[in-house]
Amino acid sequence: MSNNHKLLLLPVLLCFFTMGFVDLVGIAANYVQKDLGLTDAEANLFPSLVFFWFLLFSVPTGILMNRIGRKRTVLLSLVVTLVSLLLPLFGESYELMLTAFSLLGIGNALMQTSLNPLVSNVVSGEALTPTLTFGQFVKAIASFVAPLLAAWGATGGLPILGLDWRILFAVYGLVAVGAVFALSATPIHEQEADEACGFASTLGLLREPFVLLAFCGILCHVGIDVGTNTTAPRLLMEYAGLGLETAGYATSVYFVCRTLGCLLGSGLLQRFQPRSVFGVSCVLMLVALGGLIVLRSEMALYACIGLIGLGNSNIFPIIFAQALQHSPRQANAVSALMIMGLIGGTVFPLLMGAASDAVGQQGAVAVMVVAALYLCFLQSRMKRN
């Protein structure tokens, strides 16, 4: 990659960091619940809104990119995200926080749909997949920092501002402003608009076998991601007899390993074919999921959860890049369909919940095994170079 392309990537990577702001909804929902005395159902509405907006806004964003371009669409997403971060600085009512999180979800749907194809205008060919993977690593940093900032503010980090844990929104808002100016000042030559530019033509791409397979692959990837975060603590409580406070560290183990996997994958994908890395990732997840079914010791369960994080870390960027390369003239529409696949974060927990109610936590793990087996099948249909 030339030095010029590396410079162009810097503001794009800052946008990936901004993309990670959506993960603050998890920790923020807990603080809002405590401050306002909300029920679990009322508090759970906040993270549910995120996936809802992905379903509604992915395809319209693909169409919008054809009209105003990818860079302008990313800038729009940054502005919407900035507004969502500013609102909590003026209050903390339930209605205000619902509005803020809704805008955060909408902004993230716009960003995830437009930012990934924008990367293909900066790098191309074999460099695309490792670059998208490194972008996921940068995104994960923002996800990690959010709970730390919130805890710092809650314990009196900057009492002069009177924001307590909401200092998180102020800090991330400043980063969002920086991302807007950095990307605005960066010249990026974009490709011509897609051939497919409407709802019908975008959804019609699902008739192409590989695009449909990739879409289902995103569903499975997100299903395993959200499913692990939901089920892992329950497995430790049921099998190892841990309390919720201790078992909750399972989620941190998953995210740590997934973040490390993104960093490792960005290097491996420069040396090995994406298809090969994808295959190894699938095997890691299958072995780990099998371990969750038969193992009972605390350390063994933590090891399996970590392996799932490593295995699932590079699945999304590889599928995304393969789909874009399969239909480069419909990149905006393909991106919209792939991001719509994030609805798997809603579908799979419902299936896993029904399975666990029927046969216990092993039933939930079995649903994830089916998803991992599908990803193995998808690997066999990927191109070899």
Image: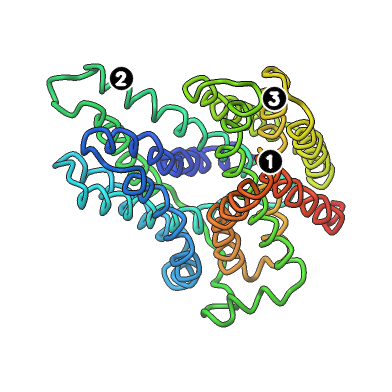
Query: In the depicted view, which residue is nearer to us: 288 or 82?
Result: 288
Q: Where is residue 277 in the image (x, y as percent from the top left)?
A: 80, 40
Inspect the image, locate mark 2, and give the three-letter code of the amino acid beneath it: Trp
Query: Which residue is tagged 1?
Result: 314
Q: Distance between the residues labelled 3 and 1?
A: 22 Å
- Residue lying at 57% horizontally and 73% vertically, measured from the top left: 194
Q: Residues within 10 Å of mark 3 (few under 14, many from 20)?
A: many
| Above or below: residue 17 compared with residue 237 | below
Give the left or right position of residue 50, taking residue 321 as reference. Answer: left
Give the left or right position of residue 297, taking residue 91 as reference. Answer: right
The answer to whether marks 3 and 2 mark residues whose Cβ atoms lie closer than 8 Å is no
In the rendering, which numbered label is found on residue 152? 2
| Above or below: residue 117 compared with residue 61 | above
Inspect the image, locate mark 1, and give the three-letter code of the amino acid beneath it: Asn
- Badge nearest the viewer, 3 or 1: 3
Outermost residue toward the bottom? 200
Residue at disc 1, secondary structure: loop
Residue at disc 2, secondary structure: helix
Query: In the depicted view, which residue is nearer to us: 39 or 202?
Result: 39
Quarter of the image for the N terminus: give it. top right
Q: Where is residue 55 in the image (x, y as percent from the top left)?
A: 48, 64
Q: Distance between the residues labelled 3 and 2?
A: 31 Å
The answer to whether marks 3 and 1 mark residues whose Cβ atoms lie closer than 8 Å is no
Q: Which of marks 3 and 2 is nearer the N terminus?
A: 2
Residue at disc 3, secondary structure: helix
- Badge nearest the viewer, 3 or 2: 3
Query: Which residue is tagged 3?
Result: 301
- Residue lying at 72% horizontally and 19% vertically, measured from the top left: 297
Q: Where is residue 26 in the image (x, y as percent from the top left)?
A: 41, 38
